[in-house]
Amino acid sequence: MVRIFYKEGRLIKRENDIRELGKVKNLVWVDLQSPSAEEEEWVENKCNISFQTPQEIVEIESSSRFFEQNDTINANSNFLKIDRHGYETYPVSFILYQNVLFTYRRGDSKTFADTVKKMKVSPEGIQSGVDFMLLLLETRIEADADSLEGISRDISAISKDLTREQKARQEVLIRISGLQEITMMLRETSIDKQRVLSGILRSQYFPEDRKEHLRIILKDISSLLEYTTFNFERLEYLQNTFMGLINIEQSQVIKIFTVVTIIFMPPTLIAGIFGMNYNHIPSTAEPWGFWVSLLLMLLSSLVVLWFFRRKRWI
């Protein structure tokens, strides 16, 4: 699918027929979403550009994430997709050529849909593909910020549950681990965008009058990175709290077994003495000897319990 956006007066209009690409004037943005080989080749021929291969887009080297060639800015960045099915990253390729933005991606993305909605609300703010690119990046950063706020709310909910219940449950640890993973991926994608935008900021082909706007976006990314660090620290604190509760529960179990063992030690000793096969053990030949031995075992256990209670060990 290829979506073509062009400016007509003060409005931004959209064209879905790729055959109209060569006829459209005041072109500002061409969005390629899972295009066919024919669509990709058509755009390259009509607009005199060249897209990277999917393998090149996902490369992590700096030379692959951002480079300039023939008055063209090429940049690749990973976006994070979070929904009810889970989370995953997907690459997005940007090409800025003669103030026209070209984007290449696989699959649908809420970020691009939200960008189009914002454009419809304020079309006068879009003068070229550069403005579309900045709006797209702002929308992505806002989505990341919303995700971080959602993670922060989940962290607060887990903290309240641990404080209220004071009990370690396996599902809590799984939730903490999942939040750590999402936060790590948000941090990773934010650093990726920061690196790419820093390269664009130094580019001689990026308009000077838009670089201040780009610096503001970079500051927003820095704020997100600080927020992710804060969430990491909270999650680590929660994890330590969880492990502390587990240690307390284990200590209580060990304490119970220790107390039970010690309580039964004196009765066991008495039973062992009376069970010896000697003729001269007192009361062994008497009919009441059995009951005396039981009474002594009971008294020894009660004395140990009384001693533990007095020491406040139980």
Image (spheres, helix red, strand yellow):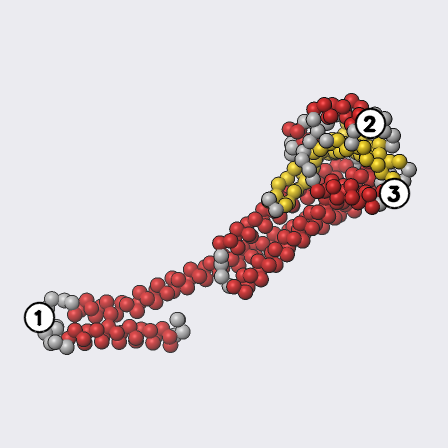
Residue 33 found in image quarter = top right
Reply above or below: 288 against 166: below
Q: Identify the mark at residue 279; answer none if there is no mark.
A: 1
Q: Identify the mark at residue 124; answer none if there is no mark.
A: 3
Mark 3 Cα-neighbour bin, 10 Å: few <14, some 14–19, many ≥20: few
Residue 102 location (% of width, % of height):
77, 32
Q: Identify the mark at residue 20; answer none if there is no mark.
A: 2
Dividing the image into 4 quarters, which one contains the N terminus? top right
Residue 20 visible in the current orientation: yes
Identity of the residue drawn at 67% across and 53% down: 149
Asked whether the beta carbons under mark 2 and mark 1 sit within 8 Å of each other, the answer is: no
Q: Secondary structure at mark 1?
A: loop
Dividing the image into 4 quarters, which one contains the C terminus? bottom left
Q: Earlier in the sequence, mark 1 or mark 3?
A: 3
Q: Left of 295 or right of it: where is 311?
A: right
Q: Residue furthest left?
A: 279
Mark 2 is on which residue type? Answer: Glu
Mark 1 Cα-neighbour bin, 10 Å: few <14, some 14–19, many ≥20: few
Mark 1 is on which residue type? Answer: Asn
Reply above or below: 223 against 40: below
